Amino acid sequence: MIKKAGGMMAKVKMLVGFNSSVTAQEMKSLHTTAGTTVIKAFKEINVHLVMLEKDILSKAVSVYRGSGIVDFIEADAKIRLELPPVNVSVVPNDPGLQQQWGLQAIRAEEAWSISPQDSLSTRIAILDTGIDTAHPDLAEKIIISRNFTNSPTVEDQFGHGTHVAGIAAAITNNNIGVAGVSFNNAYIMNIKVLGDSGSGDWSWLADGILFAVNNNANVINMSLGGTSQSDTVRRAIDYAVSNGVAVAAAAGNDSSNTPQYPAAYSGVISVAATNQSDQLAEFSNYGAAWVDVAAPGVEILSTTPGNSYGFLSGTSMATPFVSGLAALILTTYPDLSGTEAANVIRQSCDPISGTGELFLNGRINAEAALMLPRSLLTNVEPEQIQESSSSSSIAPKIKSVKKPVQNNPNMLRPVKNTASSLLINLDESSSILINESKLKKYEDARVNSSSSSSLKPLRVEKSSRTGSQGPVYKPINPWKIY
C-alpha cells in the first residue's frame, strides 16, 4: 500500500500476455508507459505479473491494449479447491486396502501384476494445498517441496493435498495405511499452489505448472478449478503438454455441465467422479463436450495430515486415480511420453452408463490401459527381448527411496506407422495372434512403406489355434515384462 493524502491507495495485480515476437526492451518500455511494476516474469510463456495503483487501472489497460504487442490482459483471479461435499471421517491406522473400493473398480491389482512394482522412475506433481511431508505413507516418496503461495509453510494445513497424494502414490505393500494407484513406481512432487484456506491465485498455479515441467514432472495433478478462465494458465498448460507431460484436472462438484477450468482446456484429462455403483456421482460435473473420463470419487480412503487416514468424496479424489494410472503406464512403457500415456487412458476406458453423454470415454480401467500399448507392434528385434515370464505375486514392500532409473533400452516403443495398425490383437489369454491375411498385409506394408527401414521382418511361429480366416501365427518372444 502507498500512503496518500486522505488514506491508503489500493494496488491491484494483472497478468499481461505478450506475443511471441516482442523484445525485452519493448516489454520494459511498455510497462513504464503503463505505470506498472513487474512482480514476476513467466518467461516460458511470455507472461508478466504486474502491480499497479488502482486509480490508473483504466489508463494501463488502454496502454497495453493499444500497444500491438500484447495478446491478453487479465486479473490475477482466485482459484479454489474442488471441495468434497462430505467431511473427513477418521479410521484406525491399519491396512485399508479392502476399504479402497476404487482400486477394485479400476482393476488396479490386475494392473499391478503387469507393471513393475518398485521402480520409482516417474514423478507426479501434486499441485494443491501442500502435503504432510512427515506422513509415513508418503514421506519417503516426496522428493521436492515448493511453496508458491502466501502461506508460511509448504505443509498441508487444509487437509486436501495430502489426501490427493495418497490416492495417486501412497507407499504400497508396506503393512500400514493404504495403497496408491501407482504402487511404488512414482515419486511425489509437493507443489503448493493453494493457500491454507484452500484458495489461490492464477499466477500461483501457473508458477506451479512451470516449476513442475522444468523439474522433470511426468504427470501433473490439479484437483482444483472454477468457471473462470485464465490465458496465463492455459499457456502454462500448453507448455506442459508440449513438453510431453500428462495433465489431469478435476471436473468440479457442482452437478453442472458448465465447463470448469483448467479441466476444460485442450490437452488436459478432465475427470468426473463415479460412485460404488459405477454411476456418475450426484455431485460431479459432467458433459462429454469437455469431460474426458470418469474415476472413483465417493468415500475414497486415503492419507490425511497427522499420520492419519480418512474418507473424502469429490472429483478432487477421482483425479489422482487418473494421475496415478498415468504414472503406472509410464513406468511400464518408459518410452511413451506423458501425453501419449494420457491418450492410452482415454482409449482404454470401460463404457459404463453415461459414456458419450456425461463423459466422453468412460470410466478408467488400469488393467486395460496397461494392456493397450502391448497391442501395438514394436520395432525391437525379437532377439533383443526375452520371453515373458508368468506373473508372480505383488513385489515386497518398499525398502528405501531409489534414484530415478534410466529408460531401459530393451523396453518397447510403439511404431507409429500404417503397418503396425494392421495386425496385432489380444485374445482372452493375452497371447498376440495374427492371421495369415494380416501377416501378408504387414509384410507388403513393410516392403512398400516409406518407413520400411524402421520395420523389421516379423518372425512368427504357427499357433495351435485356428481362426475363422485360417491358420493363426504369433510373434516369437514378442514381449518382456520385468
Image: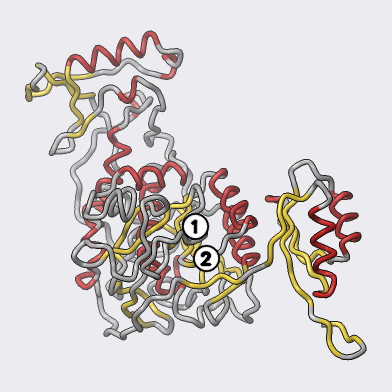
Hey, what amino acid is under mark 1?
Answer: Ile
Residue 220: numbered disc: 1
* Residue found 60% across the figure and 48% down from its top: 239
> From the viewer's perspective, is 204 left or right of 161?
right
Whether residue 170 is visible here, answered yes or no, is no
Which disc is residue 72 wearing? none
459 sits left or right of 161 in the view: left
Figure quadrant of residue 460: top left
Considering depth in this image, is 426 or 480 the residue closer to the camera? 426
Q: Amino acid at mark 2?
A: Leu
Is 7 drawn above or below residue 480 in the view shown? below
Q: CA distance from mark 1 to mark 2?
A: 7 Å
Task: Give percent across and percent down for residue 252.
Answer: 42, 66
Residue at 21% across, 67% down: 276
Q: Is residue 308 left or right of residue 406?
A: left
Residue 408 coordinates in the image, percent (x, y): 42, 40
Between 381 and 26, which is closer to the camera in this rendering? 26
Q: Earlier in the sequence, mark 1 or mark 2?
A: 2
Q: Position of residue 350 (x, y in %)?
A: 24, 49
Marks 2 and 1: in contact by CB < 8 Å?
yes
- What residue is rendered at 83% in x and 63% in y? 60
Q: Quadrant of the C terminus?
A: top left
Outermost residue toward the bottom in this view? 6
Left or right, 278 with reference to 87: left
Find disc 2 in the rendering and name its residue: 127
Place of residue 81 in the rendered image (x, y in percent of width and height, measured from the top left): 48, 72
Query: Where does the N terminus fall, quadrant-wise?
Result: bottom right
- Local packing at callout 1 (Cα closer than 10 Å; few below 14, some 14-19, many 20+) is many
Q: Is residue 243 something that shows in the picture?
A: yes
Identify the element where label 2 is drawn. strand
Tell me: residue 217, above or below residue 194: above
